[in-house]
Image: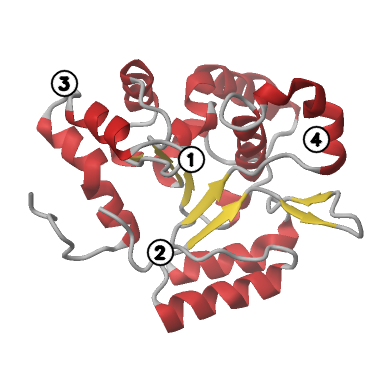
Amino acid sequence: MALTPWPSTLSMHEPEQAAAELKRCVSQYGFKGALVNDTQRAGPDGDDAVFYDGPEWDVFWATVTALDVPFYLHPRNPTGTVHDRLWAKRKWLIGPPLSFAHGVSLHALGMVTNGVFDRHPGLQVVLGHLGEHIPFDMWRINHWFEDVKKPLGLACRKTIREYFQQNLWITTSGHFSTTALQLCMAEVGTDRILFSIDYPFESFADACGWYDDLHLNLVDKRKMGKENAARLFKLGDFKDAKA
């Protein structure tokens, strides 16, 4: 199952402009939400990183919510001084081995702790690669948020688990580990997991062969395989929808 039309790609330099462009893409062309590569590079030399977790971005998130479309927070490669200071001497860690999850998990958890989902409770955000490491640290994050950080002033209203139940989705893109998927099923739940491949970085054969061979009950396998995506992206009747 592929998305047609696909999610839009936006310039995220300025919240109002990004909101207007998303509205145009969805209302005029039927795009299924947005896919954005983590932080927006900005500044005279492109070395500044714009995060979307501050109140200045409320106008954008309000538009996403009003349009009732999902937002996919996708990784990007480190650039500028971030690359030079953190990754240049550790080049083999750039991308899927570490830097992708490092960047997106920081951004997604920033959205949680800075109250984005509290101000926009209907917002739906998708994280690839089985949640960019977050599900594997779920207990520890929840423990420190609830037992340590909130008594010190952390103001987010819900637990990290509740945000995953109500606002966050994860995909299997580029992460074809049965053991890891089973952990995510336990920590996140099968209602919030989407089968995905990560083509062209991963192959259809590897992803589909792995998923087809999973020993799961048919209800969960169908949900994660296509039903959740059909519900999230409002796909209607698509090819093999009933297969």
For mark 3, what is the residue? 215
Q: What residue sits right under mark 1 in the picture?
A: 163
x%, y% of residue 184?
38, 25
Amino acid type for the residue under numbered disc 4: His
- Image spot of residue 203 (x, y percent): 36, 37
Closer-to-camera residue (54/36)? 36
Query: From the viewer's perspective, is 172 left or right of 46?
Result: left
Q: Nearer the viewer, mark 4 or mark 1?
A: 4
Q: For mark 2, what is the residue?
A: 6
Q: Residues at badges 4 and 1 in contact (C-beta under 8 Å)?
A: no
Disc 2 or 1, which lies upstream in sequence?
2
Q: Nearer the viewer, residue 196 or 163?
A: 196
- Nearer the N terminus, badge 4 or badge 1? 4
Question: What residue is rendered at 21% in x and 65% in y?
Answer: 236
Q: Secondary structure at mark 2?
A: loop
Image coords of residue 114 (percent x, y): 69, 45
Kind of element beneath mark 4: helix
